[in-house]
Image: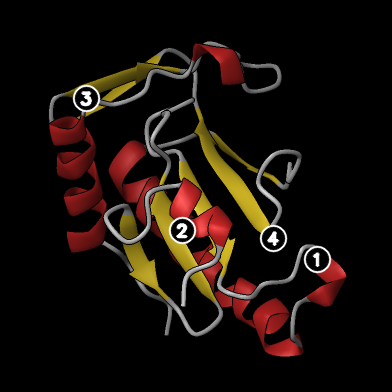
């Protein structure tokens, strides 16, 4: 069962990878190329409210995210932001960071905030076909540590 936050970020059509406690979704507005949402499947609205297994699984998922984005986007740094101001359920915004711009499957996105904080207001909303090409690419090339 999907929670409200997962649905807000386009689940199930934005799904890249499904784990026991979490889903990795393509973020519709790409702050940087490869921007993702790492959303808990739980109805928890506080990080401390997640089951222990969800916390343990983060080690595997972050390794998978970082390996995949390193291969696909060649980022310099990566930011995990737990904002939860509008969308209530536990989730992270994942932004690969780099100087300049990156391109993949016909989508080019500059990191407008580099080297400072991510510029959330600069994020273009992807057209549906471009988002699907990017989601498919990440899904097909997802690297797993397990």
Q: Marks 2 and 1, Cα distance to the nearest angstrom?
A: 20 Å
**Residue, x 55% and y 58% (percent of image)?**
4
Q: Position of residue 107 (x, y in %)?
A: 21, 24
In the picture provided, is 129 more to the left or to the right than 38? left
Q: Earlier in the sequence, mark 2 or mark 1?
A: 1
Q: Marks 4 and 2, Cα distance to the nearest angstrom?
A: 17 Å
Q: Is residue 94 above or below residue 57?
A: above
Residue nearest the observer in this picture, 115 or 52: 52
Residue assigned mark 4: 90
Residue assigned mark 1: 47
Label number found at residue 142: none
Q: Secondary structure at mark 3?
A: strand
Label number found at residue 65: 2
Q: Are marks 1 and 4 in contact (CB under 8 Å)?
A: yes
Q: Is residue 15 above or below residue 82?
A: below
Tag 3: Cα neighbours inside 10 Å, few (<14), some, or many (≥20)? some
Tag 1: Cα neighbours inside 10 Å, few (<14), some, or many (≥20)? some
Q: Marks 1 and 4, Cα distance to the nearest angstrom?
A: 6 Å
Q: Are marks 1 and 3 in contact (CB under 8 Å)?
A: no
Q: Are marks 4 and 2 in contact (CB under 8 Å)?
A: no
Q: Position of residue 59 (x, y in %)?
A: 62, 74
Q: How is the image coloured?
A: secondary structure
Q: Marks 3 and 4, Cα distance to the nearest angstrom?
A: 28 Å
Tag 2: Cα neighbours inside 10 Å, few (<14), some, or many (≥20)? many
Q: Earlier in the sequence, mark 1 or mark 3?
A: 1
Which of pointers 2 and 1 indicates the residue nearer the eye? 1
Q: Earlier in the sequence, mark 1 or mark 4?
A: 1
Q: Marks 1 and 3, Cα distance to the nearest angstrom?
A: 33 Å
Which of pointers 4 and 2 indicates the residue nearer the eye? 4
Residue assigned mark 3: 107
Q: Secondary structure at mark 2?
A: helix
């Amino acid at each position: 069962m999907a929670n409200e936050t997962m649905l807000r970020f386009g689940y199930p059509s934005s799904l890249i990878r499904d784990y026991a406690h979490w889903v990795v979704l393509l973020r519709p507005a790409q702050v940087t190329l490869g921007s993702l949402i790492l959303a808990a499947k739980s109805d928890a609205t506080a990080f401390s409210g997640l089951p222990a297994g969800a916390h343990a699984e983060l080690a595997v998922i972050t390794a998978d995210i970082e390996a995949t984005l390193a291969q696909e986007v060649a980022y310099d740094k990566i930011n995990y932001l737990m904002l939860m101001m509008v969308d209530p359920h536990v989730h992270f915004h994942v932004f690969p960071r780099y100087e300049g711009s990156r391109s993949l499957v016909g989508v080019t996105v500059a990191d407008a905030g580099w080297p400072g904080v991510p510029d959330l207001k600069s994020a273009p909303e992807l057209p549906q076909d471009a988002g699907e090409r990017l989601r498919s690419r990440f899904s097909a090339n997802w690297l797993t540590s397990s």
